[in-house]
Image (spheres, rainbow, N blue to C red):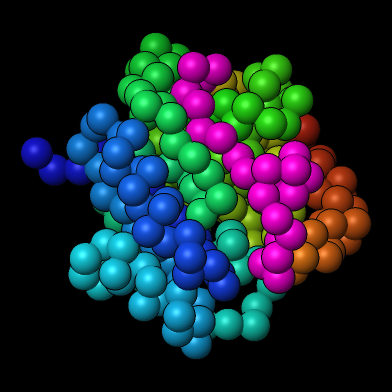
Amino acid sequence: MSAMLLVAIPVLGRPHRAATIAASVHDNTTLPHRLVFVCTEGDDDQIRACVEALGDDDGVLFIDAGHTGEYARKINLAFQAGDEPFVFLGADDLEFQPGWDVAALEVADQTGAGVVGTNDQANSAVIAGLHSTHSLVRRSYIDECGGFVRGEGSVYFEGYSHQFVDNELVATAMARGCYAHAHRSRVIHLHPLWRTAPMDGTYERALADGATDRLLFESRRGLWENGARVV
């Protein structure tokens, strides 16, 4: 059976996590799926670890280094390089729980939502169903509507340094009436903010421009609050 689910995992500077996240995906995903790592050119230890974790290099994609919005660009590349009807927007600091995919797809089937949030068991807004840091997206929704206004064919807006890409995806989908939350789809987010992961260079880089990213998010709010709804 061909894969119906693509799990996209952008990575940077954490080769020790490659085998762990690959095992977490494969051991806890019930449906036919394909795992893709998206690496940065020149991050050689990471690239080798990803190839070893997959057993080949067919599932390793690359972007060039040194640009704003690297995480968003990696997700967009993985999405555009695949054809699976559903794509999970992952990271290497997650712990997938058994049946996470079935629970998320059930909500997608029941609601027809283009963006389905998962439960990271960490962020209070996520636990309440008001946000999602790592979501499942429907390919047809992204192709036809885009993950952001005027972003047809792309999941994330690449103008952010790192933060708030998920906020804009979710807020836009909510404004369009295209969001649903899968409370029983548990994908634990390990992060220094929750004291479940140690700080490292990758987290420091991701957190560095948070204030600037927040200002950009607020400046773009009118895009989804004014006329973003899908009829």
Residue farthest to the left, as pictured: 1
Looking at the rendered image, the quarter that the C terminus falls into is: top right
- The answer to whether 120 is drawn above or below residue 160 in the figure is above
Q: Provide the residue span drawn in magenta.
A: 182-203
Q: Position of residue 151 (x, y in %)?
A: 57, 52
Q: Position of residue 211 (x, y in %)?
A: 90, 57
Residue drawn at the location 81% of the way across and 40% of the way down:
222
Q: Position of residue 153 (x, y in %)?
A: 45, 53
Looking at the image, how many numbered discs can be counted on the residues? 0
Which is more toward the observer, 35 or 217? 35
Which is more toward the observer, 29 or 175? 29
Residue drawn at the location 56% of the way across and 35% of the way down:
188
| Side (left or right) of 121 relative to 44 | right
- Residue 39 visible to the viewer: yes
- The answer to whether 136 is drawn above or below residue 155 in the figure is above
- The answer to whether 134 is drawn above or below residue 23 in the figure is above
Q: Position of residue 204 (x, y in %)?
A: 77, 65
- Residue 117 visible to the viewer: no
- The answer to whether 6 is drawn above or below residue 136 in the figure is below
Which is more toward the observer, 207 or 21? 21
Looking at the rendered image, the quarter that the N terminus falls into is: top left
| Side (left or right) of 166 relative to 218 | left
Residue drawn at the location 30% of the way across and 71% of the way down:
51
Residue drawn at the location 61% of the way across and 68% of the way down:
70
| Side (left or right) of 51 relative to 131 | left
